[in-house]
Image (tube, rainbow, N blue to C red):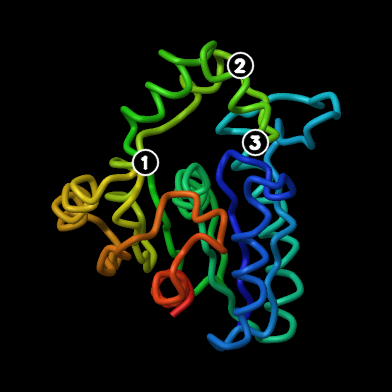
Amino acid sequence: MKLLIFPGGGNPDTPLHREVFDLIGQNTRRFGYTEMDGNLRWPGQYLPGDAPSGHLTFDGSVAAADGQLAEHERRYERDGIGYDILARSYGTYVALKSILAGEFKGRRRIVLWGAPPFWVMWKLFLRELDEGRARRAAKGLHLERSFFPSLEPIEWLLQETPRTVVVTSGSEEAYSPPAFQAYLMQLALSSRGNVRFRPTVQGAPHETRRIDELKPDVIEAYLNSVLG
């Protein structure tokens, strides 16, 4: 079983995000995965100090994801291998849309960590677009005003999903509070797929960086939630 990572908006190669992706990669085999692929990047993601080579859009992200999934499917189907997707933050939107956009036989389940409400995306990426420019630069992310209008609400995407989806988040979420998870539970009652929810990980923040500042039991609970 393989694990594919759909990152959030922040570039996984930046110091702000690298630790959590390393943590996941170091523990995939312990949870039954033979390989983790964390190479997927969205258009508009870049390394600080470099010039952006484009900007983030929802359609562009879905196209990037589907291109990589199609490549994996050719290999995995030939070898009879299945895979899971772990999607984080903005990547949860892309993962759910990819399920609707294409049919990939080897996909077993999608785990969504820290799915932000649509109104949070509006606040961050339209209302506070200019104020957040420096913060996004530190995350290695370039987007323009066309980004938010390109989105589809995750509340709708979750209801339309035809596949198995696992939803989870942390108690210290800055962008996906526990109350939103409760709201998604209600919406999932009318979904077309099998949507399950895991208990909120106590003490875990949205971006789960600075691993050395988290208690070992929080780290273990986080890993169990996203990989178990």
Nearer the N terminus, badge 1 or badge 3? 3
**Residue 205 against residue 56 in the figure, above or below:** below
Q: Amino acid at mark 3?
A: Lys
According to the image, label 1 marks what residue?
174
Q: Amino acid at mark 1?
A: Ala
Disc 1 and disc 3: Cα gap in Å? 16 Å
Q: Residues within 10 Å of mark 3 (few under 14, many from 20)?
A: many
Nearer the N terminus, badge 2 or badge 1? 2
**Residue 49 against residue 145 in the figure, above or below:** below
Percent x, y for residue 14?
72, 45
Percent x, y for residue 32?
56, 88
- Lateral position of residue 187 relative to residue 217, left or right: left
Residue at 24% over, 55% down: 191
Percent x, y for residue 227?
48, 75
Task: Quadrant for the N terminus, please.
Answer: bottom right
**Residue 124 against residue 24 in the figure, above or below:** above
* Mark 1: secondary structure: loop
According to the image, label 3 marks what residue?
139
Residue at 47% over, 63% down: 214
Tell which of 160 and 95 is nearer to you. 95
**Residue 63 against residue 189 in the figure, above or below:** above
- Lateral position of residue 214 relative to residue 11, left or right: left
> Which dot, 2 or 3, sits closer to the camera?
3
According to the image, label 2 marks what residue?
144
Q: Amino acid at mark 2?
A: Glu
Q: Residues within 10 Å of mark 1 (few under 14, many from 20)?
A: few
Disc 2 and disc 3: Cα gap in Å? 15 Å
* Mark 2: secondary structure: loop
Nearer the N terminus, badge 2 or badge 3? 3
> Which dot, 2 or 1, sits closer to the camera?
1
Residue at 58% over, 33% down: 59
Which mark identifies residue 119?
Answer: none
